[in-house]
Image: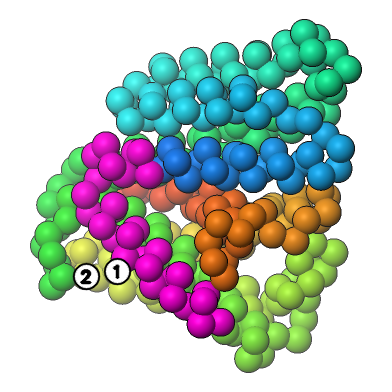
Amino acid sequence: MITRIVSGIVGIGISAYVIQEGGTLFAAAAGVLALLAWIEFTRAFSYRGGNPTLFTGVLGIGGILYGAFLGRLDMVLLAVTASTLLALLSCVLLRGDVSVPDVCASAAGICYIGLPFAHLVLLRQMSGGIYVTPVGVFDLGTAMVWVMFIGTWASDSFAYFAGRSFGAHRLAPAISPNKTMEGFLGGLVGTTAVTAGLGYVLHFPLEYMAGLGCAIAVLATLGDLVESMMKRHTGIKDSGAIIPGHGGVWDRFDSLLFTAPLVYYYTIYVVLR
């Protein structure tokens, strides 16, 4: 537990610096995390004897993140298309080494990991106002990235403690036996309150931010369950051990893969409307 707490504090400190700095550093950090998650993803599927196209994913996810950094959605689309077609061709060119299921897992994984991190980069680069708060001055992109991270962390934390304290009814016993309905409801209420509080500090409409908090709690839970389902399918417990006490990058950012696109589109279509 001590290791988990210490690594969490260090991670929060590094994350705070990277988020505030933005720009190239933020995009590079997102790219590194995405590629590490992709490596863990391919390694997980290899445990069942599969052979996902690792190099194709590195090229595809790298291209997706680079296009997002430049704000070039055409480059993002090109990277997705090219890497998907290259993965498909690999089962023909490397017949016997790369199977059709390997190709399907590869194409899905490139989108599953690459596109959410691209949304994270696009969210950080978003402009639309300056917000003066008691803890500093933030532009729109920085503020919403903080909302996304704090909301996602709140969902995980409230769900964990509510589940430990009151959990009695399993939420998805066949996928994640430790998750409970009480934990989910605790995460839902806690995340809604925390996100509404952030909205108050940032001078956003509280009803908008409360709605976003509800959505973050739901999507964060679903993101966690998706990764749990994949780990159960591949027969692994943790995706890696790169983060002491927390497992791998995929383990740590599984909820973000769902909440980053959510917050990006919520900002465009609700907050900025």
Give me the residue at 41% from left, 17% from top: 74
Quadrant position of the N terminus in the picture: bottom right
Give me the residue at 51% from left, 82% from top: 2
Q: Nearer the viewer, residue 138 or 14?
A: 14
Q: Nearer the viewer, residue 233 or 181?
A: 233
In magenta, the rendered stretch is 1-29
Give coordinates of residue 165: x percent, y percent.
63, 91
**Is 128 situated left or right of 252 in this image?**
left
Determine which quarter of the picture holds residue 177: bottom right
Q: Main secondary structure of the magenta part?
A: helix
Would you name the residue on which mark 1 appears? 198
Q: Is disc 1 in contact with disc 2, using a CB cutoff of under 8 Å?
A: yes
Q: Amino acid at mark 1?
A: Leu
Would you name the residue on which mark 2 appears? 201
Q: Nearer the viewer, residue 117 or 15?
A: 15
Q: Is residue 7 above or below residue 43?
A: below
**Is 203 situated left or right of 256 in this image?**
left
What is the crowding at mark 1: few (fewer than 14 residues within 10 Å), some, or many (at least 20)? Answer: many
Q: Is residue 83 above or below residue 238?
A: above
Give coordinates of residue 31: x percent, y percent.
43, 38
Give coordinates of residue 186: x percent, y percent.
56, 80
**What is the secondary structure assignment of the residue under circle 2?**
helix
Give me the residue at 54% from left, 24% from top: 60
